[in-house]
Image (cartoon, grey):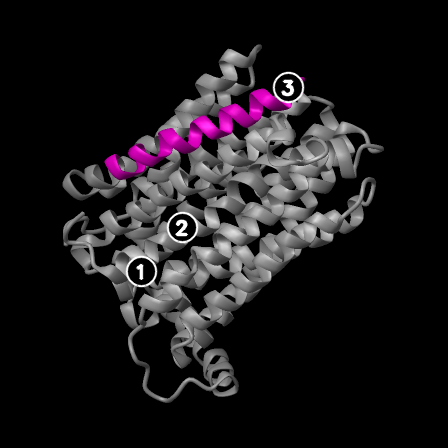
Amino acid sequence: MRSVSKAAWSWAMYDWANSAYTTTVMAGFFPVFFKQFWAADLSANESTFWLGLANALSGLLIALLAPVLGAMADRGGLKKRMLLSFTTLGVLMTAALFLVDHGEWGWAVVIFSLGAIGFSGANVFYDALIVDVAQRSQLDRISSLGYALGYIGGGVLFAVNIAMTLHPEWFMLADKAEAVRWSFVSVAIWWGLFSLPLAYHVREADVEGGTHWHQAARDGFAQLGDTFRHLRSLRQVWLFLLAYFLYIDGVNTVARMAVDYGLALGFDASVLMTALLMTQFIAFPAALALGWLGERWSCKGVLLVCIGVYAMVCIWSSTMQDAGDFYWLAGSIGLVIGGIQALSRSMYARMIPEHQSAEFFGFFNMLGKFAAVVGPLLMGAVSMVSGSARFSILVIVILFAAGAALLYRVQVNDKP
């Protein structure tokens, strides 16, 4: 990694910063705390429905806004400013979870949804900034570096947060509930602090025409229609986006609903937290290895393998019986989760016009967020109607299969 610039390292460190939200809040403590503390009076299926709805609504809003915001950022040179604005929203809302009392599940849903909007909105511009910090020949490597640092950084804080809940007395806390609430505060501090390298060291390319917000908004709306028509004419980009929409739906759903699924099957929360932590540390070297493999073999080929592993994990998870099975599944996901995300980003970055990266990544993230709307709702609805959490997970396999079939047809020059 000696050839990686200071700007690229600083960009990648943002993944270290915001991945604490993904692990401790989104995938880890929020689903458990929501079921057992804020929504303790609701049935398991009802709390699953409301958790899925919270994820879906936040995903829907940012999905609708992402292309317009991306167009504004490209026209005004505002990618970094908008990233930091959404980051501020996410940090404040994450800290605000500390204030939600027992039984106030409605407030928990609202605050969590706003935090998720901050997280997802910032990622639109974070992804787009990759073309400002990495040369074409480095896209796979730098994208994988970001995800690798994210998994190790999120894992480090998650390990501390787990220790806080298992031994609150070590941290001078009264009980497990207080430890979880302070864990949310620690995520907010971590996220804000480690965003500073990007704020200070990443510079986006100058844009002719100034950086006024109101002018950028007008120009962005005017440009959006032209870009959509341009996007439709880029057949391979459009085909990739359709494939991405399908398979990333499965990835997002597994990530957001895995803990809730495990709880529905009766596994102890400590088993689920340990499995998530294991996934983080496996994903760190695996993401780097898959990035290296993508550069030397085929980015698309590695993606197809990762999708296949995810589909098999979903089928396997519908039959698992004990904690050992859950650990094996977590390890399997750890091997591919970083690769499927990093190589999707770098493959797309290689296919789009660099001077419109935020706008095109707005469409990229829009489809990803719409997938996050469909997936959790499908899983929650199937669980509610059928009364079987095991049956609900099998729906996701269809999305992986369809996504892989479309991705196979995408033609792209993997080599720089």
Which of label 2 and label 1 is nearer to you? 2
Residue type at numbered disc 3: Asp
First to last magenta residue range: 265-289
Q: Earlier in the sequence, mark 3 or mark 2?
A: 2
SS assignment at label 2: helix
Q: Please name the residue that numbered disc 2 is placed on.
A: 15
Residue at 18% x, 51% y is 413
From the top left corner, tell me how far across and down residue 183 is, in percent.
60, 42
Disc 3 on helix, strand or loop? loop
Q: State the residue position of label 1.
A: 130
Asked whether the beta carbons under mark 3 and mark 1 sit within 8 Å of each other, the answer is: no
Q: Mark 2 and mark 1: span between their CA atoms?
A: 12 Å
Please tell me which of labels 3 and 1 falls first in the chain: 1
Query: Residue 391, relative to residue 121: is it above or below?
Result: above
Q: In the rendering, which numbered label is found on residue 268?
A: 3
Is-magenta flag for residue 280?
Answer: yes
The answer to which quarter of the image holds residue 9 is: bottom left
Nearest-to-viewer mark from 3 and 1: 3
Of 219 and 20, the residue lying toward us: 20
Q: Residue at x 56, y 36 (%)?
A: 161
The local secondary structure at tag 1 comes to helix
Q: Quadrant of the C terminus?
A: bottom left
For the point 44% across and 26% down, the residue is 278
Q: How many marks?
A: 3
State which tag comes first along the sequence, 2 or 1. Answer: 2
Would residue 232 be visible to someone looking at this image? no
Q: Is residue 415 toward the left or the right of residue 308 in the image?
A: left
